[in-house]
Amino acid sequence: MSSFEATNHYFRKAAAIMQLSPSIVEHFQTPQREVKVGLTLEMDNGDVRTFHGFRVQHDNSRGPYKGGLRYHPHVDPDEVKSLASLMTWKTAVIDVPFGGAKGGITVDPKTLSPAEVERLTRVFVDKIHDVIGPQQDIPAPDVNTGAQHMAWIYDQYSKLHGHSPGVVTGKPVELYGSLGREAATGRGVAIATVEALRMQGKDIKGATVALQGFGNVGSFAARFLVDAGAVVTAIGDHTGAVRNVHGLDVGKALAHVRKTGGIKGFDGGDALKSADLMLLESVDVLVPAALGGVITRDNARDIRASVIVEGANGPTTPEADAILDERGVLQVPDIYANAGGVTVSYFEWVQNLQQFTWTEDEVNEKLKAKMIRGFETIWKVATEKKVSLRTAAFLVAIGRVGKARVLRGLS
Ligand code: NAD
């Protein structure tokens, strides 16, 4: 099942509980705008190449469209559509005043020089500048894009529309970015984990955690979990996995990854087969923070953790979701668990509009409050309606978006 079908599956499950009419279901499954542009570029060697760029704007009932831009050879319209709708539900569940969008360019940026990537980014802005903007649609980094790309977009858009730092988030801190943005998703995952355990009457202190993925999300989540008292007993990435039942030194693991490019060979624990990381005994919390579709019907029955906190987007297939629910494993869904990033993106946008900067402590405090409130909201709905946290998150999100749309009038 593709990520598009998976998102629609969860959406339809919640829509059925809400008894949404088929016409409203169709409305929410149809993006408000899909833009496809040709991007023709002169390469460094004088050749001319044309790339395809996309921007899908799913829904703006609650505010300007919001969502990342990815540069990847597999970017296709279907995938972008699914990710755009996920953003609509994510911004609604964490309650930031945005809608949902996603975009990207079908390109392997590793095959381009930095100057070519910059020109490609600027051509993309030239082609979509009239459908993005601080009050219209606010892109952000995603796979293979980062703060530098956002700086180029801000610059190119501002040449056409005047000084507009609020047109993108995830900018460098030196250029209207927000303190705390880099760590925000991992920080949010750690807060979600603490809340999930607390609601189950368990303490984060001494809880054992295994993380798949030790990049931006996984490594910050690991650090904040250890700060909160958890014991990180296993870490895996694309190079391998390492385990130490007494706890891995996250700082040393990170230094090893920075030096060697991966966790493989880290001598703070024993080597482990990557696939076994998710099936370890004596692990309380599993944090998938790498790829989508890694928890499937083939391994869901063998996962021993009692809590799964989804740092990655779409790590669990619908078949696995059903198996885990049936087994009583608490799944903290991606649309809530990894929403810390978009929350601090919202804070960045607010600071840009106010032309005022907040301290890192202010950002972190406000993020914590949003994450805790978000958890309490979905937990309450899950308890009242006797549904999973995932279904509860979709119920909350669809309810909020639907209410805003009805108040504004259908369009
Ligand atoms: P990243 O590129 O910084 O890190 C990815 C990690 O996954 C790396 O440690 C990499 O080694 C590991 N990995 C890759 N292939 C793997 C494999 N086959 N097996 C095991 N590990 C593998 O990416 P990130 O920003 O940390 O994002 C991770 C996930 O979180 C993605 O699903 C992303 O969509 C999602 N996410 C990220 C953010 C954010 O703010 N960065 C926000 C929301 C969701």
Image: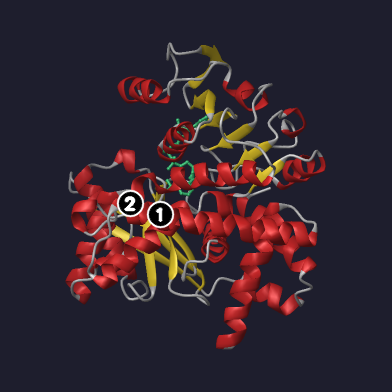
Could you classify mark 2 by the number of other residues whose Cα lies within 10 Å: few (under 14), some (14-19), or many (20 or more)?
few
The picture places residue 155, in percent across and down from the top left corner, at 20, 63
Q: CA distance from mark 2 to mark 1?
A: 6 Å
- The amino acid marked with disc number 2 is Asp
The residue at the point 35 percent across, 46 percent down is: 182
Q: Is residue 68 visible?
A: no
Residue 123 is tagged as none
The residue at the point 29 percent across, 68 percent down is: 166
Q: Are the two marked residues, 2 and 1, in contact with CB atoms closer than 8 angstroms?
A: yes
- The amino acid marked with disc number 1 is Glu
Residue beneath label 1, please? 365
Residue 361 is tagged as 2
The residue at the point 68 percent across, 41 percent down is: 201
Q: Is residue 344 visible?
A: yes
Q: Nearer the viewer, residue 212 or 129?
A: 212
Question: Helix or strand or loop: what does disc 1 sit on?
Answer: helix
With 14 as the anchor, is 118 left or right in this view?
left
